């Protein structure tokens, strides 16, 4: 029963972390697929998708109340009011009353409630009031902190929320159309406008424009598609993208994922482009329906979560052993089993880390807010620990090492001589492509003088397009020039373009692409690469105007006409950022699909040197064992495919590294998911942002370095509470066992233990706001649960030594050694125990001398002084009799000061020994 309840606690603990909603969808997909692979459509969903797949597009649009140009804003709002927002059940925050229940139903608070009930039954109303206050305080603080944390997380995530490209039309156009029909007047309707809308605002009937890199935001029926490939691996397990078609579907399959004209929420476009109409949103999607039925959608615990669980289990097991032991010792030696039972229950309360969820929540939330001020948005709060533990960062070159301000430096023929013909061909290619326009296309299109010279709108008409993909690494457009012939213009990576060329243009003459000419071409492009230029080859061929649809097979027999070369200079901040990351124990490795010569030159300029660059072809040939060695000895990897990047990340993880991957392209998504911490930027494609744990508002390694330091500070503060709780609780129980065995009365009443625990817990609320020593953030910090147990055994007995000294002082100096004087004894230990418990956080928060060499945060110091003052006031003030305490003689306090100084001195000596022997984290 207790085990099940504890598991429920940590399940709710993980769920309340403010995990990124869209990212959680990706995490859920795998469990949904395994729970129901290829299953039939849910009953409520089946007819909707089946009908959408088999209906003619015009009939479907009419049924949805839509139009080929999409909905108007007012129509969309009316539908949204009826069907709700595009959110699956797991995306919705629970109502406040359910969240309050989740905060209460922890084994810790349930145990306190049980003790309060027992106290009430035994008519101990004071203990009932104190325990009830502990429950209220624990639940209220956690509830308020988590509501604030979730609100802050939602605000941060809203800064990087994904959008969809939607067609919007003006209803005035409908009136114009009716007027045309009624009056037989020819009017010229305005084209629909494209707008970017938050995914949550989509409604059935919205018409979307999809291109490479887009997440599919809802269940949609394709209206048109061009070489559309969709990745459904997370839902189906298929490693390869699936091609989708805008065809009239015959319903000949029971598996919805086999429908060729339906694309599903949670999948993503790998290549191609399409127009689609939304047919289902939120819970009415295939993903949403399965999510509602799935029984296990929680993410596998991270290393940190598992470590927190281990510490909590340790204390719980400790409690189950020690509480009965205390019960029997006091029952047999004192003879009052009721009092012994209450005392044992109080010991159990003292051992339960009821503030652990709240401390972790508030520390993570504070860390996320601080990171946001440094332009780092945390989508998944638990990722902060991995951020601090990261010791290898894999990053792309473009925009990270370089300025991400690519400009067209040269446009040359095959000999490297300037050529306007090459620039014009490249311009037409970039102008007419509708897929994912990258920075290279933007740089080409900035040459507006070409637009004026060619006048594409007047002289050219787009016929078709063969979109880019990462296997071919090229893309083509087909244009009709004055409708007398078609021209296919292809641009892409040099080797891939050469593979489909049979001729090369020299001046006005086309020559066969011989081995000798091919060697010269490679020398010219290599020279451009050596100058740090990224080279894109341009090829073309003229075709008769006899076909309107073209495919990859038509990319053959082309004529190489030249190259466009781009310059992306390194950032001035890159070299110092790399040095700062190295000083903080983070190795940087460059993983890029770019040319090895360009990559090597940029890396040399920023101080990242490697004896040899590993190519994607080398990675392809390596076994896993060979790759494991290669990733340790090399820092630069070039000409990589998405699969190569993912494999390198997994090899580093298998070697024991905590790996971060920073990327912003669709080709980075697999590696982002494989890494311990995925890092992307606000300008990234949808799928990259979805796969990331951290979003940078500025694509800079310097921003990342600041984020790493802040992540380590957050982790260090969480570790303070865990280490302090484990060691302090162990010491207290050891002291109780000694006192119970040798003292003829209870060393403290149950109410004393409860009040002490309440005050102690309250003093720890300020830990998230504490300062952190520079040496604690200098190197990666990894969670080591075994270190917690060792730390507990080393430092727990230290406080017990001084507790026992206090026992002897109270018994021998103040003669409080009989049941008649037990109140004096209990008051003395109450004050000393609270003082040492409150001071322990200051002692173990740093390996330095506390207060002198390392100053705590202002909030923590203020809370410590407040609790210590309250601890002295309770026995010395007018409330002493209420808490069954009594005033201590003034001679007690000099002895107390000596005991506390001795405690601090011995703890400091133990710290020095421990750090030399085991290190300090």
Image (cartoon, rainbow, N blue to C red):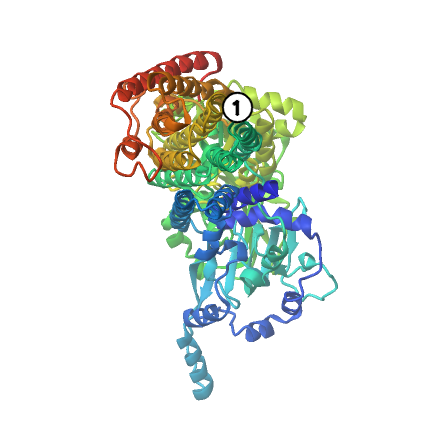
Q: Position of residue 111 (x, y in %)?
A: 51, 42
Q: Position of residue 320 (x, y in %)?
A: 57, 33
Vertical position of residue 707 compared to residue 222: above or below: above
Circle count: 1
Query: What quarter of the picture does the N terminus occupy?
Result: top right
Query: What quarter of the picture does the C terminus occupy?
Result: top left
Residue 50's quadrant in the figure?
Answer: bottom right
Residue 418's quadrant in the figure?
Answer: top left
| Residue appearing at x 68%, y 50% in the figure | 35
Q: Position of residue 906 (x, y in %)?
A: 38, 14
Q: Which one is nearer the viewer's eye here, 909 or 375?
A: 909
Say whether residue 597 is left or right of residue 359: right
Q: Which one is nearer the viewer's eye here, 250 or 439?
A: 250
Vertical position of residue 90 compared to residue 350: above or below: below
Q: Position of residue 462 (x, y in %)?
A: 52, 58
Q: Which one is nearer the viewer's eye here, 518 or 231?
A: 231
Query: Which residue matches tag 1?
Result: 789
Q: Which one is nearer the viewer's eye here, 330 or 897?
A: 330
SS of the residue under disc 1: helix
Spot the residue most to the bottom: 183
Residue 493 visible, this angle: yes
Spot the residue most to the front: 820
């Amino acid at each position: 029963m207790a085990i099940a309840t504890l598991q429920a606690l940590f399940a709710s603990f993980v769920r309340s972390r403010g995990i990124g909603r869209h990212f959680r969808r990706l995490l859920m997909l795998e469990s949904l697929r395994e729970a129901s692979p290829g299953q039939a459509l849910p009953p409520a969903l089946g007819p909707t998708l089946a009908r959408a797949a088999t209906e003619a597009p015009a009939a479907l649009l009419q049924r949805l109340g839509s139009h080929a140009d999409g909905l108007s804003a007012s129509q969309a709002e009316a539908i949204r009011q009826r069907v709700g927002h595009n959110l699956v059940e797991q995306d919705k925050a629970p109502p406040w009353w359910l969240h309050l229940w989740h905060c209460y139903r922890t084994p810790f608070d349930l145990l306190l409630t049980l003790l309060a009930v027992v106290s009430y039954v035994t008519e101990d109303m004071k203990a009932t009031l104190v325990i009830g206050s502990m429950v209220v305080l624990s639940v209220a603080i956690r509830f308020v902190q988590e509501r604030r944390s979730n609100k802050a997380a939602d605000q941060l995530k809203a800064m990087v929320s994904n959008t969809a490209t939607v067609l919007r039309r003006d209803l005035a156009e409908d009136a114009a159309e009716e007027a045309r029909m009624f009056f037989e007047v020819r009017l010229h309707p305005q084209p629909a406008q494209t707008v970017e809308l938050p995914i949550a605002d989509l409604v059935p009937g919205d018409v979307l424009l999809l291109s490479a890199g887009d997440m599919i935001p809802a269940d949609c029926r394709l209206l048109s598609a061009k070489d559309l490939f969709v990745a459904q691996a997370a839902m189906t397990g298929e490693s390869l993208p699936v091609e989708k078609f805008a065809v009239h579907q015959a319903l000949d399959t029971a598996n919805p994922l086999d429908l060729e004209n339906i694309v599903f929420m949670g999948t993503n476009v790998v290549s191609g482009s399409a127009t689609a109409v939304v047919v289902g949103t939120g819970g009415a999607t295939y993903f949403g329906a399965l999510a509602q039925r799935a029984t296990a959608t929680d993410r596998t615990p991270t290393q940190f979560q598992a470590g927190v669980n281990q510490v909590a289990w340790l204390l719980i097991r400790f409690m189950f052993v020690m509480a009965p032991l205390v019960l029997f010792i006091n029952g047999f030696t004192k003879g009052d089993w009721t009092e012994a039972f209450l005392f044992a229950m109080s010991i159990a309360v003292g051992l339960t880390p009821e503030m652990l969820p709240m401390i972790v929540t508030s520390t993570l939330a504070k860390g996320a807010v601080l990171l946001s001020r440094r332009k780092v948005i945390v989508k998944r709060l638990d990722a902060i620990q991995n951020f601090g533990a990261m010791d290898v960062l894999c990053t792309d070159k473009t925009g990270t090492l370089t300025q991400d301000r690519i400009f067209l430096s040269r446009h040359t023929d095959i000999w490297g001589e300037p050529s306007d013909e090459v620039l014009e061909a490249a311009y037409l290619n970039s102008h007419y492509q509708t897929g994912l326009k990258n920075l290279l296309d933007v740089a080409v299109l900035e040459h507006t003088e070409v637009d004026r010279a060619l006048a594409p709108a007047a002289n050219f008409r787009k016929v078709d397009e063969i979109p880019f993909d990462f296997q071919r690494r090229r893309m083509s457009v087909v244009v009709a020039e004055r409708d007398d012939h078609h021209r296919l213009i292809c641009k892409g990576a040099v080797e891939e373009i050469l593979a489909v060329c049979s001729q090369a243009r020299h001046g006005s003459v086309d020559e066969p692409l011989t081995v000798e000419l091919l060697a010269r071409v490679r020398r010219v492009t290599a020279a451009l690469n050596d100058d740090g230029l990224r080279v894109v080859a341009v090829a073309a061929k003229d075709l008769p105007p006899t076909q309107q649809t073209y495919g990859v097979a038509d990319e053959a027999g082309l004529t190489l006409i030249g190259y466009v070369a781009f310059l992306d200079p390194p950032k001035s901040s890159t070299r110092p950022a790399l040095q700062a990351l190295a000083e903080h124990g983070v190795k940087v490795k460059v993983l890029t699909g770019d040319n090895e010569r360009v990559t090597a030159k940029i890396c040399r300029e920023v101080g990242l040197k490697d004896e040899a660059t590993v190519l994607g072809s080398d990675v392809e040939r390596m076994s896993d064992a060979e790759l494991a060695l290669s990733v340790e000895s090399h820092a630069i990897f070039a000409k990589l495919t998405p699969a190569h990047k993912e494999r390198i990340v997994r090899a580093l993880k298998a070697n024991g590294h905590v790996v971060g991957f920073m990327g912003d392209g669709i080709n980075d998504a697999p590696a982002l998911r494989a890494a311990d911490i995925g890092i992307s930027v606000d300008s990234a494609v949808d799928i990259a942002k979805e796969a990331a744990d951290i979003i940078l508002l500025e694509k800079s390694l310097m921003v990342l370095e600041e984020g790493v330091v802040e992540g380590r500070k957050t982790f260090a503060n969480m570790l303070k509470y865990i280490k302090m709780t484990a060691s302090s609780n162990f010491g207290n129980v050891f002291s109780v066992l000694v006192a119970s065995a040798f003292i003829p009365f209870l060393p403290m009443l149950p109410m004393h233990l409860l009040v002490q625990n309440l005050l102690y817990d309250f003093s720890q609320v300020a830990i998230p706001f504490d300062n952190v020593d520079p040496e604690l953030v200098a190197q990666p910090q990894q969670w080591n649960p075994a270190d917690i147990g060792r730390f507990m055994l080393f430092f727990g007995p230290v406080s017990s030594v001084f507790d026992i000294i206090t026992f002897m002082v109270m018994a021998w100096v103040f003669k409080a050694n009989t049941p008649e004087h037990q109140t004096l004894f209990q008051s003395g230990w109450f004050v000393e125990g609270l003082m040492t418990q409150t001071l322990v956080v200051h002692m173990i928060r740093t390996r330095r001398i506390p207060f002198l060499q390392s100053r705590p945060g202002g909030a923590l110091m203020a809370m410590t002084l407040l609790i210590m003052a309250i601890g002295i006031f309770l026995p010395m003030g007018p409330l002493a009799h209420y808490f069954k305490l009594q005033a201590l003689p003034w001679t007690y306090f000099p002895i107390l000061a000596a005991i506390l100084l001795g405690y601090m001195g011995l703890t400091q000596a133990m710290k020095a020994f421990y750090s030399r022997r085991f290190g300090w984290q």
